[in-house]
Amino acid sequence: MSSSAETLSQAFTLGYTYTRSTGPIVGQFLTSLRARKMVGIKASDGKVLMPPVEFDPVSAAALTEFVDVADSGVVKTWCWVKEPRKAHPSDKPFAWAMILLDGADTPMLHWIDAGDEAAMSTGMRVKVRWAAETKGVMDDLNGFVPESVALLTELKPAASDEPIIGVESPSYLTYNFTAGKATSLYLRSMKEGKLVGQRCPKCRNVYIPPRGSCAACGVPTEEQVTLSNKATVESFTIVYIPIPGNPIKPPYVIANLVLDGANLSFLHLLSECKNEDVRIGMRVEALWRPEEEWGFAMENIQYFKPIDEPDMPVDQIGKLIDEGR
Amino acid sequence: MRADKMRDVAIVAFAQSNCQRDAGAQNEVELIMPVLSEVFKQAGINNAQDVDFTCSGSCDYQQGAAFAFVAGVDALGAVPPIKESHVEMDAAWALYEAWLKIQMGQAESALLYGFGKSSPGELPIVLSQQLDPYYLAPLWVDSIAFAAMQARTMLDSGEITENDMAEVVARSRNNALANNPHAQLKGDQTAADLLKEATYVSPLRRHDCCPISDGACAMIICTIEKAKEWGKPYAVIKGIDHRIETHHIGSRDLSRSVSTEIAAKAAGVANGPVDVAELYAPFSHQEIILKKALGLGDDTVVNPSGGVLAGNVMMASGLSRIGEVAMRIIRGEAKRGVAHATSGPCLQQNLITVLEAK
Ligand SMILES: [Zn+2]
């Protein structure tokens, strides 16, 4: 986490770890790739579409007739990437190109390892550089090369002949998250062991964590309110289901807590009591971790625990006493 | 949609934020709130409670924040509850949804807003993941590469020259300098100055590509009757239509925008002279494709704001194009105009709006 006077920011990677079913058309294409063969599909007008698609782009008719296509062809258009991005298939400069394979009527998009931009031209002939080991994935095509380039011929046979019906297609995207003004204020206070909310200038509701606006009134919230470590249980649930990656062992209690001085609740853990003793109106207090462990995080509070105070009457929970309402 | 069978809809208010390379600490709510209060002021209303419908456009993948569009609702004031909707698209498509609501008689007025923070992620790579998930997304082919291949198709055919592309950029930046306080890129370079720059993803130079911008915009539309009741000046939506082309990129003629041609016809672009056009062309050569697809002649002023080459708030730029034309009509600078919004690689989807003075 880096911080400046205004902003808190942190890089994070979001992973979409999907497995996709391919269906018969894409599945057949990938199965053929594994056998180092290219196949297109015949469209309603007789044209061979490459790569094959399930439905005709013009008539929308379902397509079924596969056609063998060569693994070499002509560059119809291209561009040159001088500075490949991290996600790109090559870490050296390369070309993206639309390549019309012999026997196909539509060009397919792939990349060309040509070494230098000067080696590229529209109309040049290229051929597939097959991966040494094929698995039935797009990476079986290790790009294309100019047709004159000699390729190593040590190609291993495919490990399986089962038809491809699914592919793992994880994608990871890295972002730099910046907390908004209100969230930054909140997280900075957490780092100092304080709970700070914001009050709406219109309806007087006190938000914690603050979001910079009143969701009810649609106006900015700027007035800061330092809140107590004491709170009242507004509602709760006992979690019995283990959640992957969560270190807390079920059953445990998650409660909606209203801090003294606030009237809107927020979620936290409740502990140091029997689950069956938890009740609405119960008085609790934050248990902070040791100061040297504090970060810009909600986890600075380990959990809330009961205190020896009489319960808050239900009709007073979420009322702002100092506001007289 | 044929406007002659439809109710005219009035645009009464529009506001946009500055296009900034990095809005830094500002979150969605903090980006949206200023443009909302500006349009409420222009329309003379208090808040979102005073319109019948609200619709927004944004895309969570841009900033990597799940349900950012829900957080955006915090800017509205949604108590008592309001009728609200969202499109995972440019807010120009939110306008289309609201326009349909009004056509169906389910609303007399609507608030629209679009917002986007592209700065947290690597935008061209984020956009690569909107492609076909089997053949294209695994290659991570980015948005700039697609545009570059499209530009080469046109250069190879002799349809355009690199100078034509540089002329578009030079005019865009000059227009932004003269007319657009919100622009991110402005200046008085000539095409010759620009052509001295090295290529980036050849044949494109960096200046051929729109910048990455953060920001937001908002608009209020309503029936003509409502606009009169509010006593506000307005521009009229006379026609609106949108079309999409196949995701099978090899089946498309990249040098044409067939979907724009069809949408332009359906929206009635050719039914009168076009004084002004704001075209969502993220790459210089695409302005040339669009101008042709729309049948615009030299008597039409194209992108007086500088267009998105001067600043491109993804998910807000399309609605901003419509707002730019509407405000020129409201100010009396034009009688009739066309606004265009796009989405997807190489102008895959296109929305055309025809606007007239009342
Ligand atoms: Zn409020």
Image (cartoon, coloured by chain):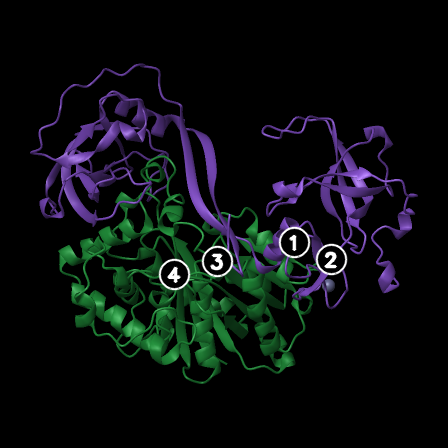
Chain colours: A purple, B green
Residues behind callouts 4 and 1 on a single chain: no
Query: Is the C-beta of the residue carrying label 1 under 8 Å from the nearest atom of ligand 1?
Result: no
Q: Which residue is mark 1?
A: A189
The percent coordinates of residue B188 (x first, y second) are 27, 77
Q: Which residue is mark 4?
A: B263
Rendered residue at 30%/27% (across/down): A29
Residues behind callouts 1 and 2 on a single chain: yes
The three-letter code of the residue at mark 2 reads: Thr
Q: For mark 3, does the 10 Å Cα neighbourhood hold few (<14), some (14 to 19), or many (20 or more) residues? A: many
Q: Nearer the viewer, residue B154 or A199?
A: A199
Rendered residue at 31%/44% (across/down): B141
Q: In 3D space, how far apart are the residues under numbered discs 4 and 1 (Cα atoms)? A: 53 Å
SS for dot 1: helix
Q: Is residue A136 visible?
A: yes
The three-letter code of the residue at mark 3 reads: Gly
> Is B28 on the left-hand or right-hand side of A204?
left
Q: Which of the two marks, 4 or 1, is nearer to us in this view? A: 1
The reply to whether dot 3 and dot 4 touch (C-beta < 8 Å) is: no
Q: Which of the two marks, 3 or 4, is nearer to us in this view? A: 3
